[in-house]
Amino acid sequence: MQQKKFEEAERLTARVEGQEQRAYLHSEIARGLLNRSESQTHGRELLDEAITEAKRSAPSRFAVRTLLTAATLYTKVDAGRSISLLSDAINCINRIESQDFTSDNQALEMKLERKQRGGQYGGEYSFRFAMPGPQPESAFREMAKIDFDTTLAQSNSLSDKFQRSLATLWMAELCLAQPQQQPKAKSKILRPST
């Protein structure tokens, strides 16, 4: 039953026109498939399709989110591929103008032509699609749990100083959240009093 739902979702995703939307849907289907051991291979294939779609689209916050999603999902099955995808996401971040991932305007807007009776132009419909995905904050934290040093080195390649500072702070926060190990005190040797 569950497998049929995944197949139906995949079939419907193929009919979606926007690359960003298809990439997001592929990554979400892959997320579900990767949670099941018998479908992990197919989940990786779909995740690779999502990555391909994201890379084909123009550099945008939506492509970055898809690449970050893929990077965090790959942490469960292939850490090396995960780090490579983080590098791809950073390169995409460096190529977009507005690197603000925190503003409220995180929706993709599309305009479709509206036809009147007789096929005449009747204006446009404006559609806004919320494109969810991880914030860079959560992706950097997740990646730092797997390989802190490499993630820190990757974050240093962010061209925007503000984004680079934020990435460093996110990883520092992860370090501070871990319990600190106390150095073992030397035990005093008690000598019997005479």
Image (spheres, grey):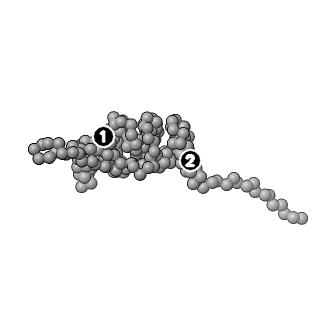
In 3D space, how far apart are the residues under numbered discs 1 and 2 (Cα atoms)? 32 Å
Q: Is residue 145 visible?
A: no
- Left or right: where 129 falls relative to 165: left
Say which quadrant the C terminus sits in. Answer: bottom right
Q: Nearer the viewer, residue 38 or 17?
A: 17
Could you tell me the amino acid type at mark 2? Leu
Could you tell me the amino acid type at mark 1? Gln
Residue 186 screen position, x and y as percent: 75, 54
Q: Nearer the viewer, residue 7 or 67?
A: 67
Q: Nearer the viewer, residue 104 or 30?
A: 104
Residue depicted at x 39% and y 48%: 106
- Mark 2 residue element: helix
Q: Is residue 123 visible?
A: yes
Read off the residue under disc 2.
169
Q: Mark 1 or 2 closer to N-term?
A: 1
Residue depicted at x 51% and y 36%: 159
Residue 113 screen position, x and y as percent: 21, 43
Read off the residue under disc 1.
19
